[in-house]
Image (cartoon, rainbow, N blue to C red):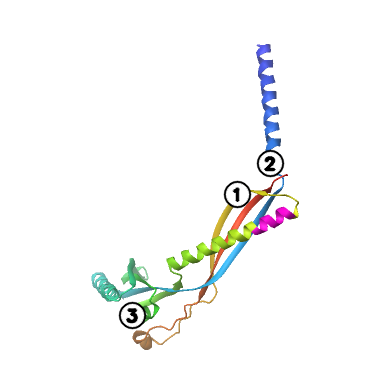
Amino acid sequence: MPGRQNIIIYSLAVLLMLLSASASADQETHYDRIHLAVTAEKEIDNDTLIVELSAREEGEDQAALASTVNRKIKQAVERSKQVSGIEVRTLTYQTHPRYQKQRLIGWRVHQAMQLKSEDIEALSQLLGELQANLSIDSLNYDISRPQREKAEQALIEQAIERFKQRAENITRQFGREKYRLVKMAINRDDQTVRPMQMRTQSAMQEKRSAPEVEPGRQILRVTVDATIELVVK
């Protein structure tokens, strides 16, 4: 048994030495590594209007309230589908009890819908009609998918080219002939630079006219985040 224990101890010692040597070798490969982050950005016009509207009713007769809300949303959906280029989607439907001094006094029924279109003028005019029965809950602008994808692809190519130039400059400044790409990540980001504006109107005006809005712009940003390793001559 003592001999066997000695063999085991010796084997473990050899294994630890090998692991230590391997770790040292790995650490050596981490020398001359440089982290770079290069960004390319561009301002893009928002070209898509996204609006959320809703119907709300309060009262004692839950069934009657639900019927009224359903009718208003149904009419709005049917009217919206008549306008070319507008995407229509119904959203949440909610029913909440109303209490007063712990006694049920009625119900509140609510349903929302979303309209989305690149034809901003047509959708704005439609909103002027729909506000007779519905309330505008939110009005936002965005960049359409084709325009976003096209712009992001151009920014990715631009950011990568800038990264390559910077990496090559750093390599030459350190007196090396070339570098090796260790890892790289491409991150996308956007930022609204000119927020949408919506003019406040009286309740009577709100029912008869479309809201005045300013689409604004967004900054699309692509960042190449990478680590390079300078190769020894």
Report which residue position mark 2 lands on.
Answer: 29
Q: Amino acid at mark 1?
A: Lys
Report which residue position mark 1 lands on.
Answer: 183
Helix, strand or loop under label 1: strand
Answer left or right for 34 relative to 118: right
Q: Amino acid at mark 3?
A: Leu
* Gap between marks 2 and 1 measured at Cα: 14 Å
Rendered location of residue 3, percent (x, y): 68, 12
Which of disc 3 and disc 1 is earlier in sequence?
3
Report which residue position mark 3 lands on.
Answer: 126
Q: Residue at x 56, y 56 (%)?
A: 186
* Gap between marks 1 and 3 measured at Cα: 50 Å
In the foreground, 183 or 90: 183
Residue 19 to residue 152: above or below: above
Contact, CB < 8 Å: mark 2 with mark 3?
A: no
Q: Quadrant of the N terminus?
A: top right
Within-10-Å neighbours for mark 3: few <14, some 14–19, many 20+: some
Within-10-Å neighbours for mark 1: few <14, some 14–19, many 20+: few
Which of disc 1 and disc 2 is earlier in sequence?
2
Q: Is residue 180 magenta?
A: no
